[in-house]
Amino acid sequence: MGFLLAIVAGSVLLMLPWSRVDGGSVPWLTAFFTAVSAVCVTGLVVVDTGTYWSGFGQAVIMVLFQLGGFGMITAGRGDDSQRQGENRRGSYRLQ
């Protein structure tokens, strides 16, 4: 649910006029694809990030990358802590 919320919020922020260098409107599909790509930390783009997006738009994309990365690390850690052989302090027993 967190990934979906980040994608929707990122898409809305990227569709704002000040997210683009020339101040024009951003097509929803471009904003949506960019937000999904950033949150999923794939790095795929449909427009050149450096020339299409303004500083604000690039900051939004960077925040989405960070949120996506934190989400993946958190999900990975949550899965790791469920494994057998781990004590309450998080260190594995030596055998």
Image (cartoon, helix red, strand yellow):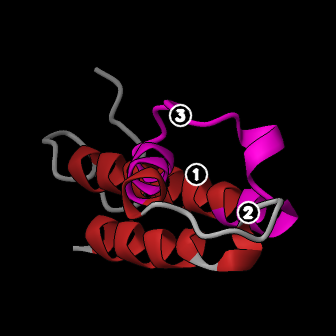
Q: Where is residue 48 in the image (x, y as percent from the top left)?
A: 69, 34
Q: Disc 3 marks which residue?
A: 45
Q: Disc 2 marks which residue?
A: 20
The rendered magenta stretch, by its main secondary structure, is classed as helix
Q: What element carries label 3?
A: loop
Q: Are marks 1 and 2 in contact (CB under 8 Å)?
A: no
Amino acid carrying mark 1 in the image: Phe
Q: Where is residue 42 in the image (x, y as percent from the top left)?
A: 46, 32
Q: Quadrant of residue 29?
A: bottom left
Closer to the chain start, of discs 1 and 2, is 2
Closer mark to the observer between disc 3 and disc 1: 3
Residue 92 belongs to the span the image colors magenta: no
What range of the chain is rendered magenta?
Answer: 32-60
Residue in the image at 77% along x and 71% along y? 23
Closer to the chain start, of discs 3 and 2, is 2
Closer to the chain start, of discs 3 and 1, is 3
Amino acid carrying mark 2 in the image: Arg
Residue 65, disc: 1
Q: In which quarter of the image is residue 61?
A: bottom right
